Amino acid sequence: MIKRTLGSVVLASWLMVSGSLQAHHSLAGVYDIKSEGKVTGVLTKVAFTNPHGAMYLSVDNPDGTKTDWVMTTGSANTLQSLGFGNSGPNTVKAGDKLTITYFAARNGKPLGFIRSITLPDQREVQISTGSSSD
């Protein structure tokens, strides 16, 4: 009976640990961290959430059309430590014109992981280095 109980505890522990390890993923799985892009557009929505936030950007194309980009960020905690959020020196809001340097999505969609943001006052804020800890 003790062997069965101990075996069940070990199995349950292993399942919990393996699940959390799979949940943490590398940026390189979704984004090409060797390819950097840059877009300028109007911020339409901000979502400072965990595990990753997002900034939605409407970008004017040369042909007059618009492309809606989803720019993934680090965690809300990371952004808050950089001065982003509901208040702070780097707070952004819908309607702000931003330039975002990003790692492009591997699938070619208008999706990127933010490397840096140039704010409306022209200050540049580094968000990610592209390492697995970002």
Image (cartoon, rainbow, N blue to C red):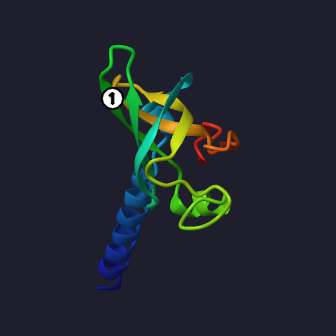
Among the 4 quarters of the image, the one containing residue 43? top left
Front-lying residue, 44 or 78: 44
Secondary structure of the residue carrying tag 1 is strand
Pick out the residue farthest to the top: 63
Question: Which kind of residue does numbered mark 1 sit on?
Answer: Thr
Please report the residue visible at 52 percent of the width from the left and 40 percent of the height from the top: 97
134 relative to 12, above or below: above
Pick out the residue farthest to the right: 123
Q: Position of residue 17 (x, y in %)?
A: 43, 63
Answer with left or right where residue 55 lies relative to residue 115. Answer: left
Answer with left or right where residue 19 lies relative to residue 114. Answer: left
- Location of the N terminus (image quadrant): bottom left
3 relative to 80, above or below: below
Please report the residue visible at 33 percent of the width from the left and 29 percent of the height from the top: 67
106 relative to 95, above or below: above
Q: Position of residue 46 (x, y in %)?
A: 43, 54
Front-lying residue, 20 or 29: 29
Mark 1 surroundings within 10 Å by alpha-carbon count, few (fewer than 14), some (14 through 19), many (20 or more): few
Please report the residue visible at 38 percent of the width from the left and 20 percent of the height from the top: 61
Among the 4 quarters of the image, the one containing residue 53? bottom left
Please report the residue visible at 33 percent of the width from the left and 14 percent of the height from the top: 63
Q: Mark 1 sits on what residue?
A: 67
